[in-house]
């Protein structure tokens, strides 16, 4: 008998290459050997593992039966040495082992040669070797994602995220990064490159951005998601945010001082795109006072080509009633989208990250939507709905003449 590593794993297991278990036949014996089970299917067994099945040999004859030898082709099946002789009516057990060394199905036959009748007992064997990939979180440790600390910024700030504290387990491996917006404020069109350790994005709307980070290690194991909140807090006591649908629709945000007029370029009592680069000087009673802090600013102007968003901040408004308007200036020519646009105006008061109120209305070209009044009385700031629309002429020239 030849000893192999497989045989040594389950002693006394023998390789199926044949053995002579009893050299002398018992003359005139009439033993009859039966096996239970009569065939063995080991099913799928992982490479590197082994499966053991037990076979009960019973002598159903009237005299002892001798097992002369065991025969089989060499391979992944092995067996423990059966008894040399089994008395009439008696049973004995022996083990058969399957230890696959390669992927795929394997078949073999174990033949027990006896001096009984019949003189051979065949035991068909079957099994399959399978390769099982290690399981993340079971066989392999998953990496850890760290999205960084929460941040507070003003609208339009460039936000810089930092996931460089993420690591493999154990540390030292290379990671792939996967950032995403879990949630964004209403109206935001912000985007970020999610495949780098330190992405950036523009906080284009007031509210809370929740950003998630997951990392993947060289084994393909993905971490749990880590999140970071970016609180975008309006700088001004009054913050107005306008968004609209339909690209190429040129919709403008207007903010008028007490006693002012729409499209007023002379006295600049209306803050809109015309004085975007040089904000007006306002003061109580309609008199410029040189105090820039109580002047509003148009911080974002869009001609309908990119974010479809505009906003105005008024840091420290003086007492009075300020009116908010939205004008659908035009749909630029030579464009296919020249139909109605749905405009949404959000009013934020006293640095809140949620709007005090949100207005939505469908507009067509040359509509002037007077949305609401902002009423300031000392520290108290409130809003009052107007929500009326009237047609205007293009006060400042033709649509295609606009270059700012």
Image (spheres, rainbow, N blue to C red):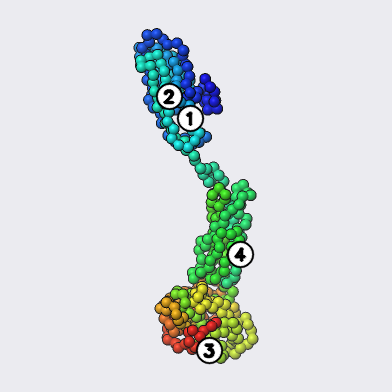
Residue 160 bears which disc, if any? 4
Q: Whole-Å distance between the Cαs marked 2 and 4?
A: 70 Å
Q: What kind of element bears circle 3?
A: loop
Please tell me which of labels 4 and 3 falls first in the chain.
4
- Quarter where residue 72 is shown: top left
- Quarter where residue 341 is shown: bottom left
Which tag is nearer the camera, tag 2 or tag 3? 2
Expressed as whole percent of the image width and height from the top left, the position of residue 370 reads: 46, 83
Q: Which residue sits at x=59%, y=62%?
A: 199
Q: Which residue sits at x=50%, y=88%?
A: 396
- Quarter where residue 30 is shown: top left
To which residue does mark 3 refer? 264
Q: What kind of element bears circle 1?
A: loop
Q: Whole-Å distance between the Cαs marked 1 and 4?
A: 59 Å
Please tell me which of labels 2 and 1 falls first in the chain.
1
Question: Disc 2, disc 3: CB below 8 Å?
Answer: no
To which residue does mark 1 refer? 76
Q: Residues within 10 Å of mark 4 (few under 14, many from 20)?
A: few
> Residue 158 or 249: which is nearer the viewer?
249
Q: Whole-Å distance between the Cαs marked 3 and 1?
A: 93 Å
384 sits to left or right of 317 = left
Residue 47 bears which disc, if any? none
To which residue does mark 2 refer? 110
218 sits to left or right of 45 = right
Q: Which residue sits at x=60%, y=59%?
A: 197
Please tell me which of labels 2 and 3 falls first in the chain.
2
Q: What kind of element bears circle 4?
A: strand
Please tell me which of labels 2 and 4 falls first in the chain.
2
């Amino acid at each position: 008998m030849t000893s192999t590593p497989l045989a040594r794993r389950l002693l006394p297991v023998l390789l199926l290459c044949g053995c002579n278990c009893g050299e002398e036949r018992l003359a005139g014996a009439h033993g009859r050997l039966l096996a239970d089970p009569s065939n063995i299917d080991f099913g799928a067994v992982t490479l590197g593992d082994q499966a053991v099945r037990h076979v009960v040999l019973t002598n159903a004859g009237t005299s002892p039966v001798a097992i002369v030898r065991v025969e089989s082709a060499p391979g992944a099946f092995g067996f423990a040495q059966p008894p040399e002789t089994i008395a009439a009516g008696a049973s004995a057990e022996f083990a058969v082992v399957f230890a696959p060394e390669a992927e795929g199905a394997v078949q073999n036959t174990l033949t027990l040669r006896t001096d009984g009748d019949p003189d051979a007992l065949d035991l068909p064997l079957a099994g399959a070797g399978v390769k099982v990939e290690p399981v993340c979180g079971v066989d392999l440790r998953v990496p850890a994602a760290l999205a960084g600390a929460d941040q507070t910024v003003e609208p339009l700030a460039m936000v810089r995220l930092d996931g460089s504290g993420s690591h493999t387990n154990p540390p030292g491996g290379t990671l792939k990064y996967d950032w995403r917006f879990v949630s964004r404020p209403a109206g935001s069109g912000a985007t970020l490159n999610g495949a780098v350790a330190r992405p950036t994005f523009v906080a284009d709307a007031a509210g809370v951005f929740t950003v998630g980070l997951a990392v993947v290690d060289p084994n393909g194991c993905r971490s749990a998601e880590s999140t970071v909140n970016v609180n975008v807090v309006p700088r001004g006591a009054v913050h107005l945010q306008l968004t609209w649908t339909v690209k190429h629709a040129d919709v403008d945000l207007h903010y008028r001082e007490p006693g002012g007029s729409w499209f007023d370029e002379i006295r600049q009592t209306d803050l809109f795109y015309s004085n975007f680069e040089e904000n007006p000087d306002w003061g109580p009673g309609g008199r410029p006072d040189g105090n820039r802090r109580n002047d509003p600013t148009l911080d974002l102007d869009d001609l309908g080509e990119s974010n479809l968003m505009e906003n105005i901040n008024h840091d420290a408004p003086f007492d009075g009633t300020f009116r908010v308007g939205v004008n659908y200036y035009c749909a630029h020519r030579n464009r296919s989208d020249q139909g109605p646009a749905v405009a949404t105006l959000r009013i934020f008061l006293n640095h809140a990250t949620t709007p005090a109120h949100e207005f939505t209305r469908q507009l067509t070209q040359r509509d002037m939507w007077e949305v609401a009044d902002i009423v300031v009385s000392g520290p108290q700031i409130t809003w009052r709905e107007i929500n009326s629309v009237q047609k205007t002429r293009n006060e400042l020239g033709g649509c295609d003449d606009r270059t700012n």
